[in-house]
Image: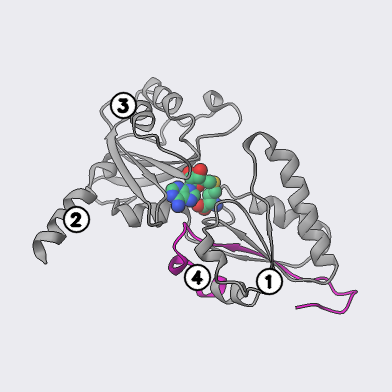
Amino acid sequence: MSKPSNTPGTVFLVGAGPGDPDLMTVRAARLLSAASLVVHDGLVDPSVLDMAPPSARFVSVAKARSRHTMRQEAINALLVREALAGRDVVRLKGGDPFVFGRGGEEAEACRAAGVPVEVVPGISAAMGAAAAAQIPLTHRDAASVVSFVAGQCKGLSDQNWAGLAGVGRTLVIYMGVATSEAIAEKLIGDGLSPAMPIAVIENAARPQMRVLRGQLAGLGALVAADKVKSPALIVIGEVAARNDTAELERIAETAL
Ligand code: SAH
């Protein structure tokens, strides 16, 4: 996909979904299977990368937590440099590029450099995890509001989450494993019931998925006892107690 030298390539910001390649959009699968340059982050499942032609060049830009800011500038520069050299770039991101994916920053950098950008949405982890665990994010009997927050962000204690969680509301926390104890304390401090149901969904939509359930007061202990690792999502709200997968599996087995 090389262009005449004065025509920039396009940067495609592509959502790869939560892991299972079957959960990519048709547009994403088409672009990936025709890609010659794939720039991907650490969350993208190897089974997704396998969809690109073996001849494609792969560049991993997996981020180390502590070097986040510097690395992002380097990623922006890489995308711009490749596109200005006339190459189309498939920039593959876990989930959706515009949900905690810094896709907005990459799109801005490309536009500022005169590089065309197309954004291909993906199934964000919240949707993928909710579907896989059969936890409805909204439910007429349990929740009519759903919010997504980042648990690992600058000044967690300064974030105002008041009103995002509670009766009739579902709170989904991305990147919250390392700070789960502080998150529970913060929400209980905001007035949330310590008995509010929670679910932790690790590796959603991947073969090694785990769904753990409990109550808000026990969130930190649950994460520690079960050695939950990133990537994992925390769901807080009445919906988290619905559709226990173990129970669903038991029903499916007896139905066979
Ligand atoms: N753009 C991504 C989110 C990137 S932030 C999206 O839309 O999904 C990274 C966080 O996403 C992880 O720390 C984790 O909280 C969540 N996440 C991503 N993939 C996940 C998966 N397969 N299972 C559980 N959580 C996941």
Cα–Cα gap, marks 2 and 4: 28 Å
The amino acid at mark 3 is Gly
Which element carries disc 3, helix, strand or loop? Answer: helix
Cα–Cα gap, marks 4 and 1: 20 Å
Whether residue 99 can be seen here: no
Label 2 with label 3: CB-CB less than 8 Å: no
Q: Residue at x 51, y 58 (%)?
A: 45
Q: Position of residue 166 (x, y in %)?
A: 33, 34
Per the image, the residue denoted by label 4 is 25
The amino acid at mark 4 is Thr
Which label was assigned to residue 249?
Answer: 2
Q: Is residue 16 magenta?
A: yes
Label 3 with label 4: CB-CB less than 8 Å: no
Q: Is residue 119 magenta?
A: no
Q: Position of residue 84 (x, y in %)?
A: 84, 66
Which element carries disc 4, helix, strand or loop? Answer: loop
User: Which is the main secondary structure of the residues drawn in magenta?
Assistant: loop
Mark closer to the chain start, 2 or 1: 1
Which label was assigned to residue 158?
Answer: none
Instruction: Examine the rendered structure and indicate whether residue 98 appears above or below residue 152.
Output: below
Mark closer to the chain start, 2 or 3: 3
Label 2 with label 4: CB-CB less than 8 Å: no
Query: Would you say the beta carbon of the disc 2 residue lies within 8 angstroms of ligand 1?
Result: no
Per the image, the residue denoted by label 1 is 56
Quarter of the image with the N terminus in it: bottom right
Q: Residue at x 80, y 66 (%)?
A: 83
Query: Would you say the beta carbon of the disc 4 residue lies within 8 angstroms of ligand 1?
Result: no
Per the image, the residue denoted by label 3 is 218
Q: Residue at x 33, y 31 (%)?
A: 222
Whether residue 201 can be seen here: yes
